[in-house]
Image (tube, helix red, strand yellow):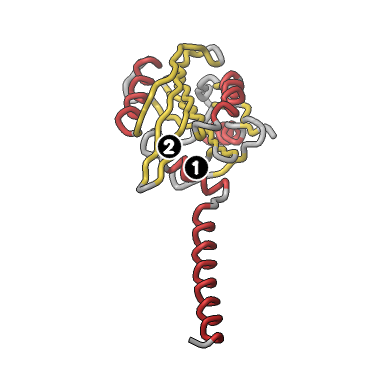
Amino acid sequence: MSQKLLITLAAAITLVILIAGISSLTHKQKKPEEESSEIVSGTEMIIVPSEMPDRISMEIPAGFTETNSPYYEKYYVCNDASVIVTGEELTIYGQDVKTYSEDVKAQYQNTADDFVLLAEEDTAVDGTDCRLFEFTYAIRGGDASQDMQCMTAVIIKDERVYIVTCKSHRDTFMTYRQPFRKMLESIRIADETFPAAGSSASAQTVTNAQSDVSAVTAVS
């Protein structure tokens, strides 16, 4: 075999190896927002409902930015961590926060892989009863998996439930845990208001729209 042919063959092999290496590196390196999107989509079937509730405000931890997805109209991300606020009207009138939170927890237990409850407590948020639980779980997909840790607060006021879900990878969760707790302590839920006698529906709509603008405040 001639030297020229050997050089050409070696160059071709080197090119194939280089392309394979670049392709592998491209698949392994993911942008933070792509990773955060996977974290959210990996549990979107667990956390229900998906509406962004009104009348609730809180101080989002520094570094978190607002974004959206096909599953949530608004949530907040920072690297691999996310904060999701959802809510709905109670379907069972008078249901208490403990009973509702047991249903939420059961959905995680029945849906998530490797669910482990770490802690659970009753507390108060803005003078309203709150059930707080912390747990780990996994997202399995093909040959890959993500080990997650999550803190979820369930609050009920005026026959509406509010669920605040804070999560990240298990090995980074302690970085966010204290900011998450501080954020939960900052939650404020406005009292339900009713139109005064003789007031127009259009005037009430404007008031509600103004309230919605300040529903969740992100603090830089």
Residue extending farthest to the left is 110
Q: Residues within 10 Å of mark 2 (few under 14, many from 20)?
A: some
Mark 2–mark 1 Cα distance, whole angstroms, equals: 8 Å
Quarter of the image with the C terminus is top right
x 53%, y 72%: residue: 15
On screen, residue 56 versus residue 162, left or right, reads: right
Which label was assigned to residue 45? none
What x and y, as percent, mark residue 177? 57, 24
The residue that label 1 is drawn on is 73
Badge 1: few (under 14), some or many (20 or more) residues near its Cα, within 10 Å? some
Front-lying residue, 28 or 111: 28
Q: Nearer the viewer, residue 170 or 207?
A: 170
Res. 102 image quadrant: top left
In terms of secondary structure, where does tag 2 sit? Answer: loop
Q: Residue at 49% across / 45% down in the picture?
A: 37
Which residue is pictured at 59% across the width and 28% down the height?
A: 176
Q: Which is more N-terminal, label 1 or label 2?
A: 2
* Residue position marked by numbered label 2 in the rendering: 50
Measuring from the top left, give residue 216's x and y in whole percent. Answer: 59, 32
Q: Which is more toward the observer, 36 or 70?
A: 36
In the picture, measured across the screen, residue 17 lies left or right of residue 210, that is: left
Q: Amino acid at mark 1?
A: Glu
Q: Determine whether 142 is above or below 47 in the image.
A: below
Q: Are marks 2 and 1 in contact (CB under 8 Å)?
A: yes
Residue 100's quadrant in the figure? Answer: top left
Judged from the image, the secondary structure of the residue bearing numbered disc 1 is loop
Q: Front-most of 159 and 71?
A: 71
User: Callout 2, which amino acid?
Assistant: Ser
Can residue 4 be spotted in the picture?
Answer: yes
- The answer to whether 194 is drawn above or below residue 78 in the figure is above
Residue at 36 percent of width and 25 percent of height:
104
